[in-house]
Image (spheres, helix red, strand yellow):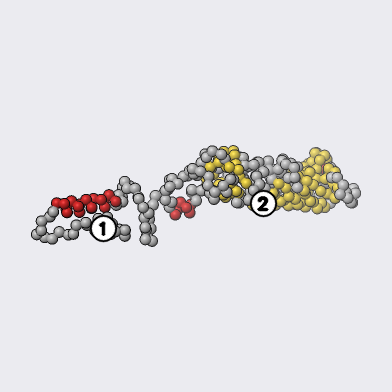
Amino acid sequence: MARDGSGVHSLPVADYVAGTTIVAADMNSNLQDISDELTNSVAKDGQSTMTGNLKMGDQRITGLGNATARTDGAKVSQIQDGSYIYGTTGGTANAQTLTPSPAITAYVAGMKFRVKIGALLTNTAATTLQVSGIAGPKDVKTQAGDALVGYELRAGLIYELVYDGTNFVLLTETRGGGTWTPAFGFGSGSVTYTTQAGLYQLNGNWCEVTGFIDIATISTPGGAFTLTGLPFTVANQDGAQGALSFVPRTMEIDTPDLQMVGYFIKNTTTAQLGWTRDNADITGTNGGAVVSATILHISGRYRVGS
């Protein structure tokens, strides 16, 4: 007699009474039933295969081993550690790869990964991600659906991406700030500084900079006058340069109505400084306009790239 649906088993033949003859057929029926139910039980050495869902009755499974395949049960510690969905990328800057363990077998909408961008793999243009070697790398897009243009994925930083059924969507943007050291560039001459101080704030692939320069001494300055030492390279694309604003003090300006302006130079860490009058075209500034004790306050914004 099989179990009754609640797990209770009964022998098919009633208990024997002392002093009565044991009938072979009855004994064999009981033994066969016991054998059948032992076969239906779970062998602790892993020989048995489940044929139905296990009702745990609010009990725990304890001592569970680490999952090594997608079809294994996961330990809470593995889920908390994020080991299934975290890894450092490989490949190249604009064609990155990820090899989580266990490996995935297909891309599925809603699939999420946290990735640390590998050393020297800061992206420079539109970027793809290939996971577990599955054919057909997927484009990485912004939440607005735009292709990456460069510097959205910085080496050593961690990002979260979700597959939407077509692309990997970048959920986290690069944000952070720090210091930089602004300096003047000249075609000729030498300079020393009393103060060189700068701060930057990175939002995605746009960088905002502020700075303060106080020249102590300057000797025979000449040639082009530039600002150097930007914290990141200006993207090599039209529209990335942005503009600089300056508040100069104690510079030798021959014409009072001249205004100092500047713009960032593509694919460099340099900004060109110049003069303008009444919204006219910018004229390059000559280093000869700079004297000792020149002070310059700086503010600007540009797209980061390489």
Q: What residue did someone put label 2 on?
A: 203
Where is the C terminus found, in terms of image quarters?
top right
Gap in angstroms between the C-alphas marked 1 and 2: 68 Å
**Place of residue 39 in the rendered image (x, y in percent of width and height, measured from the top left):** 27, 49
Going from the N terminus, do you reach mark 1 or mark 2 first? 1
**Place of residue 291 in the rendered image (x, y in percent of width and height, measured from the top left):** 83, 47
Q: Is residue 229 visible?
A: no
Instruction: Find numbered disc 1 in the image and state the secondary structure of the residue it sits on.
Output: loop
**Place of residue 31 in the rendered image (x, y in percent of width and height, measured from the top left):** 20, 52
Nearest the viewer among 240 and 13 is: 13
Instruction: Find numbered disc 2 in the image and state the secondary structure of the residue it sits on.
Output: strand
Residue ID at (35%, 50%): 51
Question: Image height check: is 109 above or below 59?
Answer: above
Q: Is residue 262 left or right of residue 134?
A: right
Residue 150: image quadrant is top right
**Place of residue 26 in the rendered image (x, y in percent of width and height, measured from the top left):** 17, 54
Question: Image height check: is 12 above or below 155?
Answer: below
Determine crowd level at label 1: few under 14, some 14-19, many 20+ residues with C-alpha closer than 10 A.
some
**Mark 2 is on which residue type?**
Asn
Nearest the viewer among 129 and 258 is: 129
Nearest the viewer among 202 and 193 is: 202
Q: Residue furthest right?
A: 255
Q: In this view, does 261 lie to the left or right of 8?
A: right
Question: Image height check: is 245 above or below 8?
Answer: above
Residue ID at (49%, 44%): 104
Q: What residue did someone put label 1 on?
A: 9
Residue ID at (73%, 50%): 301
**Mark 1 is on which residue type?**
His
Residue 69: image quadrant is top left
Q: Is residue 50 visible?
A: yes
Where is the N terminus found, in terms of image quarters?
bottom left
Residue ID at (39%, 49%): 65
